[in-house]
Image (tube, rainbow, N blue to C red):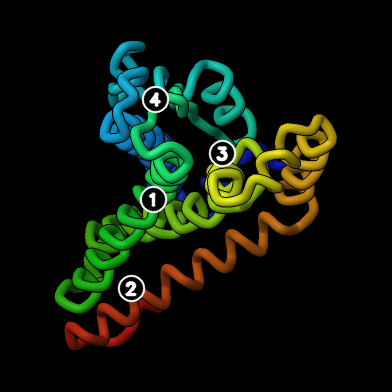
Amino acid sequence: MNWWVHAAWEQGGAIYLVSWIFWVLFSITLHELAHGWAALWEGDTTPRDLNRLTANPLVQMGQTSLIVFALVGIAWGMMPVRPDRFRHGRLGDAIVAFAGPMMNLVLAFITLTLLGVLSAMGDMSIQWMKSVSLFLFVGGFLNVILFVLNLLPIPPLDGSRILAAASPHARDFYRQQLSQMMAFALLIMIFFFGAADFLFAGSQDAAIWWSGLVARLVGAAPVS
């Protein structure tokens, strides 16, 4: 098995590798900051009290996550919050949980819209334009992946918190030790038994579709 860095280099060269590293760190950091900002809006000052409202990836992701990222290309983050302080109770918990994936959706929309405009108005035969397009494309489909993945109702992903806020039966289920074991098994299946490839390919297709639609609306051929 190739080290992911080597595989990324073979797939798209230095620009692809640098883009992947940048967007993983940047997107996860903003994802966690979105949780923190939403928690503050809900009345919980825990993120501010613990000095977690920073753009430092080492703070938002932690040493273990960054080491795993260096080894296998997968990372995660964590934003400490106190749901008992949320002014809207269970609804507040759902709002704070959804804020992270929503940030990823916004980032995907911005990068892929810019990619579509660039494709419509720029000269794709110029090398730096190709590099910028690849940079935006990687940022777009990676954030689509993060949006979809985090909405899965599997602990500790955000989707489980949203579902737990909406359903007392789900809350009771997630509190059981069996549910934690099942969640771990499902995550393994997602990453190591083909589901990750499906998510990766589907996110790229979605990125191509949206940026191509924007390019057509602006007046050019779709992104190929």
Determine the CA span between mark 4 and mark 2.
41 Å
- Report the mark closest to the observer, 1 or 2: 1
For residue 104, the mark is: 1
Q: Is 201 drawn above or below residue 90 in the view shown?
A: below
The structure residue drawn at horizontal position 55% and vertical position 51%, both measured from the top left corner, is: 166
Residue that badge 3 annotates? 5
Determine the CA span between mark 1 and mark 4.
25 Å
> Label 4: few (<14), some or many (≥20) within 10 Å?
some
- Report the mark closest to the observer, 4 or 2: 4
Q: Position of residue 132 (x, y in %)?
A: 27, 56
- Residue type at numbered disc 2: Ser
- Residue type at numbered disc 4: Arg
For the N terminus, give its image quadrant.
top right
Is label 4 in a helix, a strand or a loop? helix
Q: Residue furthest left?
A: 121
Residue that badge 2 annotates? 211
Nearer the observer, 145 or 85: 85
Say which label, 3 or 1, has the lower sequence index.
Answer: 3
> Label 1: few (<14), some or many (≥20) within 10 Å?
many
